[in-house]
Amino acid sequence: MPLAGRGEFGLIVGRDTGHLPGVARLLTDGLNKRVRGLETTIRELVTPLAPALLEITGISHVSAAVLLAEIGDITRFTSSAKLARYTGTAPIPVYSSDKERYRLHRGGNRRLNTVLYTTSIVQQRFHPGARALLALGGSRLSRTRIEMASPVSASAFRHGRTERPAT
């Protein structure tokens, strides 16, 4: 006697049904429908909250939702450098040689870091300003240029600051 039960979407699934490809397709279709519904909800909620943030190349509605949820009130960061440190995108000096070298901070909020990393990859491909900066060459970047190389957190900081009503 085959073991059977009801799945999440009310489908009767069992060990010996022989309809696994059809069941998998139904489950995939149901999950895709739920994902599209959630993306629509996120779009409706985020658009009025952060229109300037959505204008940044590489920031989707889902990315903006993560930024809003993880950062919260942007005014708690008194400078873009503190925001960069919180997100793990601040350069840290390396003192192992006589050369002035920097590496990225490995700490910080990993969800924010992932969103900013993905945004930077998109900007490298599609944003003319990012392409021009990268054309300068990675080995010749000074500390100032390294700070400019992560304009996403600075831009998010500026956009977040301008959207706050005066109190």
Image: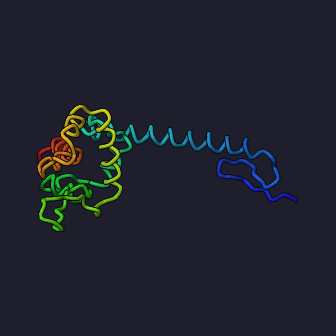
Quarter of the image where the N terminus is located: bottom right
**Front-lying residue, 167 or 72:** 72
In the rendered image, the vertical position of residue 127 relative to residue 83, given as above or below: above
Residue at x 20% of width, y 52% of height: 74
Image position of 68 (left or right of 12) = left
Residue at x 24% of width, y 31% of height: 128
Q: Residue furthest bottom?
A: 96
**Front-lying residue, 12 or 92:** 92
Q: Residue furthest right?
A: 1
Picture coordinates of residue 135 (x, y %)?
A: 21, 37
Picture coordinates of residue 95 (x, y %)?
A: 16, 67
Residue at x 75% of width, y 51% of height: 13
Picture coordinates of residue 123 (x, y %)?
A: 29, 38
Q: How is the image coloured?
A: rainbow
**Front-lying residue, 82 or 125:** 125
The picture quadrant where one finds residue 24 is: top right
Residue at x 20% of width, y 34% of height: 132
Image position of 15 (left or right of 165) = right
Q: How many marks?
A: 0
The picture quadrant where one finds residue 126 is: top left
Picture coordinates of residue 154 (x, y %)?
A: 18, 47
